[in-house]
Amino acid sequence: MLNRSAVVIGHELAFFGWLKTTGKSSDDIETLRQTSDRVVYLIPACHFSEEIDEVVEDLFEEIFLRELRAWQPDESHWPDTGDFSLFTRWFTVDGVQAVEDVGRGGIDEERP
């Protein structure tokens, strides 16, 4: 077991509404909405869901930045990422307390 918990981030309709303001076509956004994968972020180990909520509130800006960068690299289109209420309107957050690694080989870190 890894000494980490995880959060799974999904995208709400409000997120795709913002994406439309960045110049992407409605057709492109609909395709992205239908095919968008959720992203798993490892966070410090938490034993209770309340702890996960607290950690997400501490780390939301980093997650927000990563999500914006993945979908729209042009920072001039980005909103204020310091707004936790905006984050909670744009993303779903599902916490996972235990993370098990059953993969073969070591874990390699990739940087974009």
Image (cartoon, rainbow, N blue to C red):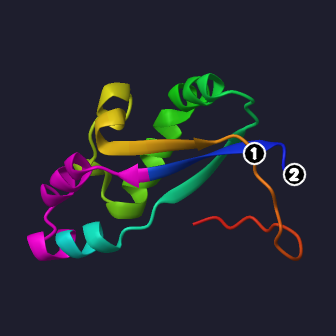
Residue type at mark 2 is Met
Q: Give the mark nearest the N terminus, 2 or 1.
A: 2
Helix, strand or loop at label 2? It is loop
The residue tagged 1 is: 98
Return the residue at label 2: 1
Residue 5, disc: none
- How many marks on residues? 2
Task: Decide whether residue 17 is among the magenta residues.
Answer: yes
- Residue beneath the point at 29% across and 33% down: 86
Residue at 26% from the left image edge and 40% from the top image edge:
79
The answer to whether any part of residue 83 appears in the image is no
> Residue shown at 64%/64% (left/top)?
111
Which of these two is toward me, 106 or 7? 7
What is the spatial separation of the Cα atoms under label 2 and label 1, in whole angstroms? 7 Å
Residue 84 in the image, given as x and y percentages of width and height:
38, 27
Considering only vertical position in the picture, is 55 above or below 13? above
When asked about the image quadrant of residue 81, the answer is: top left
Q: Is residue 35 left or right of residue 42?
A: left
Q: Please, what is the three-letter code of the amino acid marked with disc 1?
A: Ala
51 left or right, relative to 89: right
User: In the rendering, at what x and y percent does residue 39 appear?
Assistant: 51, 58
